[in-house]
Amino acid sequence: MTENNDHKQFNLKLVLKEIIQPKVPTIALVIFLNFIFFLFGVFTFYSAIFFIIIFIGFFLAISNEKIISLDTNQNNFNKKDKDELVTDNINQIKMIFDGFPESVILIDDKDNIINSNDKANKHFFSQLENENILGMRIQNVIRSTLLFDALEFLKNNEEITVKEIEIILPGEIERTYDVFISQVKLFSQDINNYLLILRETTDLKKIMTLRSEFIANASHELKTPIAVIKGISETLDKYGQDDKDSSKDFLKKLLSESNRAQSLIEDLLSLNQAEMRQHILPDKRINLMSIIDNIYDGLNELAKKNKINLTRDIRKKDYYILGDEDDIRRAFINLIENAIKYNTSGKKVVIHLSDNSDKVLFKVIDDGPGISSIHIPRLTERFYRVDLDSSIKKGGTGLGLSIVKNIITRHKAQLDIESELGKGSSFSIIFNKV
């Protein structure tokens, strides 16, 4: 009510100042002329009064149109100012958000996205390049029941304005986030907005898990060679001088177990490194033909030592993929070495490389004893061995294929294993071509 009265007073002052005051001489002249006409009998008294009222009403109508026009312009100006102010505020918020090292998303009380920083755009919205994420519901981007439950909890509990949760987002590689949700009021004191700060802890969780597994696995696998090394060392210390022939055998055994322990440690470190970098996609263009050329001579010497004929079935050309050259070299060496070492009944190992319009196929084929189908699903597990004694005798650690699997996963490639008892095996890697 007060607001309306102030508005009326404002209009009256405006009329007096802007319309009537400048026209006072004109109005006075009209009144004077009407009075003269009345004296001379041109107008009756009532006609003169009626004419004066119509004249003044005409000026008031003009003034009202000007006032309405002025008020409309003022309202439009105020609305424009408010819109510009909101836009400026959003831009300032975006600048602040971009300074955060974590992903930051601002949503309204209907779960619609109001703003987000560059890191959030990269992590969560990169697959939506052709869509405008502003106004999109957060549920369409981050699919987590825990997150939705936390938002509903804050909406239904006015006394609690902050909540912290951990979410795991599924995918080719699971990603873990610590999420800090805060209830905030920005553009309206009556509407709650919600600020989501997401800090990725995938690497941290992986490090903690791998550390525990590494300690457990290393302790178990190293227990045997260390016990053997310790026993041989104690025997040599006590009786080495008395039986020199036996001492030579003990030393050979000591060297063998030392090499086994060293190989185990190296493979554990390689596996740990491969798992740590599994979620980091390689972006360097590499040529698989060059890698095979570089490793072939060394592997051919191993094949000759084991009386195996190592051949290549490769058309001379370039085969490009996006990859990590060191990792791919390690994977190729592991597969070819396994084919050579365990090809006890065969005579041949073939390295095959080919491509089509969008894929590159690397395959290692042997004509060895083959592997039973019951073992194939578990071959890439840590420390899984088809024949434990044979594996240890040949210097195997049970980690080679697990390392290969992690490298292939990182490269978004596919591992295919085919084998039949008595007919040999083939291990294939299918890469995306670039």
Image (cartoon, helix red, strand yellow):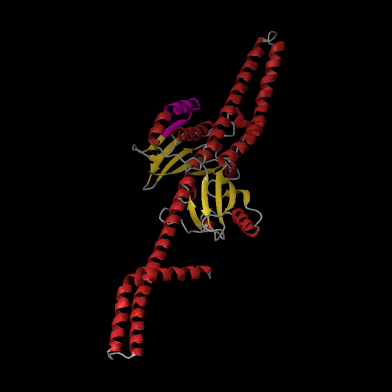
Q: Main secondary structure of the magenta part?
A: helix
Closer to us: 143 or 209: 143
Q: Which picture quadrant has residue 228? A: top right
In the picture as drawn, the residue positioned furthest to the right comes out as: 238
Q: From the viewer's perspective, is 225 left or right of 36?
A: right
- Expressed as whole percent of the image width and height from the top left, the position of residue 4 reads 49, 70
Residue at 41 percent of width and 68 percent of height: 13
Q: Is residue 118 part of the magenta span, yes or no?
A: no
Closer to us: 128 or 17: 17
Q: Which residues are magenta?
A: 295-311
Q: From the viewer's perspective, is 278 left or right of 209?
A: left
- Expressed as whole percent of the image width and height from the top left, the position of residue 210 reads 61, 36
Q: Which picture quadrant has residue 10? A: bottom left
Q: Is residue 116 visible?
A: yes
Residue at 65 percent of width and 12 percent of height: 245
Quarter of the image containing the C terminus? top left
In the picture as drawn, the residue positioned furthest to the top comes out as: 241
Q: Which picture quadrant has residue 234? A: top right
Q: Is residue 174 visible?
A: no
Q: Is residue 337 above or below residue 131?
A: above
- Expressed as whole percent of the image width and height from the top left, the position of residue 412 reads 47, 44
Q: From the viewer's perspective, is 291 left or right of 181?
A: left
Closer to us: 88 or 173: 88
- Count of numbered marks: 0
Q: From the viewer's perspective, is 385 left or right of 62?
A: right
- Expressed as whole percent of the image width and height from the top left, the position of residue 123 reads 49, 47
Residue at 49 percent of width and 48 percent of height: 120
Q: Is residue 70 above or below residue 354?
A: below
